[in-house]
Image (cartoon, helix red, strand yellow):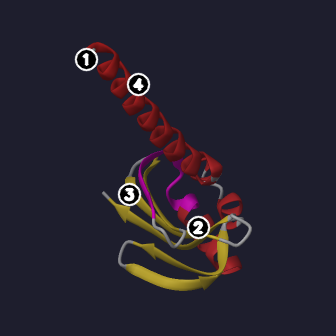
Amino acid sequence: MLKPITRFLFTLVLFFLSILVVKSQEIKEDYGIAVALEEGSSKAISNYFDEMVEISLGNNKRDFSKNQAEVVLRDFFDDYEAKGFEWRHQHQSNENFIYLIGIYQSINDVFRVLIKGKKSQNEQFIIYSLDFLKE
């Protein structure tokens, strides 16, 4: 009698874990941000920008218009040519705010990247803050 219950509980736990893993991958893969960061493409990332974006590069933190933010990132990628990018963590709050953390690798340096975004009414991901912290 105990064996079928144990098997059922084990199956149920695996089912819920697989849902969590799929949901986690879904959030990260829905955003082409990782590909844009891997390629060092400011143009591709700017597709996700809100009208105003806060960008932090080390101790320099400022608000930029969408077009200005693209130029700032282009300059950053020129200075720190992309070698790779890897997601490390994500969190989505009930209010549709999403926080993503990853590691950006340039040829010579490594940066922890914090992306703060939200889902728009049409479920598109919009970045309102982007921080690059040198490790």
**Residue 106 visible at all:** yes
Q: Secondary structure at mark 4?
A: helix
Q: Going by the image, does 3 lie left or right of 45?
A: left
Determine whether the residue tagged by mark 3 lies in a helix, strand or loop: strand
Q: CA distance from mark 1 to mark 4?
A: 14 Å
What x and y, as percent, mark residue 56?
44, 75
- The majority secondary structure of the magenta stretch comes to strand
Residue 76 inside the magenta-drawn segment: no
Going from N to C along the chain, the mark reached first, 1 or 3, is 1
- Depth check: 106 or 3 in front? 3
> Neighbour class for label 4 at 10 Å: few (<14), some, many (≥20)?
few
State the separation of the CA atoms marked 2 and 4.
46 Å
Q: CA distance from mark 3 to mark 4?
A: 37 Å
Q: CA distance from mark 2 to mark 3?
A: 15 Å
Residue 53: x and y in percent read 58, 79
Three-letter code for the amino acid on which mark 2 is drawn: Leu
Q: Earlier in the sequence, mark 2 or mark 4?
A: 4
What secondary structure is marked by label 2? helix
Look at discs 2 and 1 and give the one toward the viewer: 1
Instruction: Please tell me the numbered disc located at residue 11.
Output: 4
Q: For the residue marked with disc 4, what is the amino acid?
A: Thr
Q: Residue at x 65, y 61 (%)?
A: 45
* Magenta-tinted stretch: 77-92
Callouts 3 and 4 close, C-beta under 8 Å: no
Q: Which residue is mark 3?
A: 112
Number of the front mark, 1 or 4: 1
Q: Are marks 2 and 1 in contact (CB under 8 Å)?
A: no
**Where does label 2 land, which residue?**
73
What is the spatial separation of the Cα atoms under label 1 and label 3, in whole angstroms?
48 Å
Say what amino acid the circle numbered 1 marks: Leu
Q: Residue at x 41, y 36 (%)?
A: 17
The answer to whether residue 38 is visible is no
